[in-house]
Image: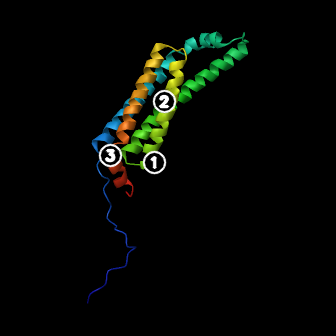
Amino acid sequence: MSYQQYPTSGFDQTPQQRPEAPPSIRTAVKLMYAGAVLSGLSFIIGLATIGSLRQAIIKASHKPLTSTQLHTAEVAGVVVIVILGLLGVGLWLWMAWANGRGRSWARIVAAVLFGFNTLGLLSVVLRPAAAGTKIFDILSWLVGLGATIYLWRPDASQYYEQSKFR
């Protein structure tokens, strides 16, 4: 006696392997990790130079500040340094993870973030700031440019297309 096979949904039930990332994606991911390191170093330098924040606030103010106003501005400055520092490192790591797994939306998000980074770089270059800060910002921008270029190469596009249904 023979039995018919139990009906299935029609979908192949064998787990599909994720295609191996091409060299351009692997390079872009490495650049994103380098961007995370640069952001981390910039964050550490920002924390190390908090002591000069008071003088920078006084110098930037066009009127005398009360001690309460000065303290509030210092606290706000520290909060901004911490939030932007952690956010910068986190975004680099998140984009490296998502793009390395072939998530096509991550390529678009990474390109948009690079656009924001470009606008931020323009503001940094145009304002007076410490040379060390500008160097980190320029290096970070160059790393982002390299990663963005590699993410949009033809072999990367093929990888995202193959990864779409996995």
The reply to whether residue 134 is in sight is yes
Q: Which mark is residue 81?
A: none
Disc 2 + disc 3, Cβ < 8 Å: no
- Sequence-wise first label, 1 or 3: 1
Scheme of colours in the image:
rainbow
Q: Which residue has dot 2 on it?
A: 118
Quadrant in which residue 142 is drawn: top left
At x 47% / y 18%, what residue is drawn? 133
Q: Earlier in the sequence, mark 1 or mark 2?
A: 1
Q: Residues within 10 Å of mark 1 (few under 14, many from 20)?
A: few
From the top left corner, tell me how far across and down residue 34 is, in percent: 37, 30
Residue 159 horizontal/vertical position (percent)? 33, 50
Q: Which numbered disc, 1 or 2, marks the residue closer to the eye?
A: 2
Q: CA distance from mark 1 to mark 3?
A: 16 Å
Q: Is residue 23 left or right of residue 40?
A: left
Residue 121 at x, y percent in the picture? 49, 25
5 shown above or below 59: below
Which residue is drawn at the image coordinates 40% and 39% (left, top)? 96
Q: Compared with residue 71, is residue 99 higher up or lower down, i.e. above or below?
A: below
The residue that disc 3 covers is 154
Side (left or right) of 97 relative to 48 = left
Locate the C terminus and report the quarter of the image it occupies.
bottom left
User: Residue shown at 40%/32% (left/top)?
Assistant: 145
Residue behind mark 1: 105
Disc 3 crowd rating (10 Å Cα; few below 14, some 14-19, many 20+) is few
> Quadrant of the image for the N terminus?
bottom left
